[in-house]
Amino acid sequence: MVDLPLKGAGKMPWPTAAEIVLSEREKKILAELSKGTHTPLHFKVRAQIILNAAAGWSNNTIEMNMQLSAKKVKRWRDKYSKMQEELRQIERESPHKLRKTIENALSDEQRQGGPTKYSDEQVAAIIAIACEDPAKFNLPFISHWTPSLLQAEVVKMGIVDSISVRQIGRFLKRTGSTAAPKSVLVEP
């Protein structure tokens, strides 16, 4: 009989989850965040992940009990673990800043977002046209721009190759300007 190697023999052991050790003050703050009636839901969930991790729960147990993805549990456990030394220092030196620092630890990092599709010059030109009388653009029977008329005009003028009516509306909203919801005809 041939001895077969055990399944998994020679492989690296499973990685262990980051250890979370909380001070009494941290536990209190995290408990308040996890149960607060005015606390945003994402803070509640993340605070509970950290409390469960500190109680010795494995990532799998947290995932199953809280019905979360493995990625989410690992992300927040690891992020909080990396901040533990900073939190200890803040608790010693500036205890009044501890809650805010914990909230920052449980916050999403600023995302860069996609590249802008329209230059500042294009946006400024669109807004400038929206401020003009449509009659100046050979639309004598229209008294106000609509987003769809404005969209057609800026494409016709070559300011942009294409743009959605919705995007025109976003640009106008950002400046506090509005366009008429539908065409407004001038009385002859």
Image (cartoon, rainbow, N blue to C red):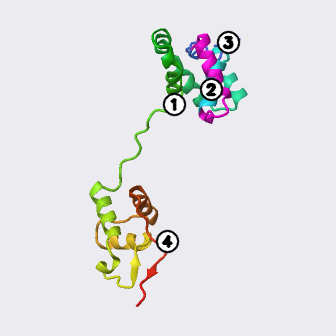
67 is higher (above) or lower (below) than 94: below
Mark 3 vs mark 1: give the one in front: 1
Separation of residues labelled 2 and 1 (CA atoms): 12 Å
Separation of residues labelled 4 and 3 (CA atoms): 81 Å
Identify the residue under disc 1: 107
Tell me, for residue 2, which label it has, or none. Answer: 3
Identify the residue under disc 2: 33
Q: Amino acid at mark 2?
A: Leu
Mark 4 vs mark 1: give the one in front: 4
Q: Residue at x 49, y 27 (%)?
A: 104
Quadrant for the C terminus, please: bottom left
Instruction: Indicate the secondary structure of the residue bearing disc 4.
Output: loop
Residue 52 in the image, given as x and y percentages of width and height:
66, 19
Magenta stretch holds residue 58: no
* Residue at the far left in the pictured view: 121
What span is colored magenta in the figure? 19-42
Identify the residue under disc 4: 181
34 is higher (above) or lower (below) than 81: below
Q: Amino acid at mark 1?
A: Ser
Instruction: Indicate the secondary structure of the residue bearing disc 3.
Output: loop
Q: Amino acid at mark 4?
A: Pro
187 is higher (above) or lower (below) than 38: below
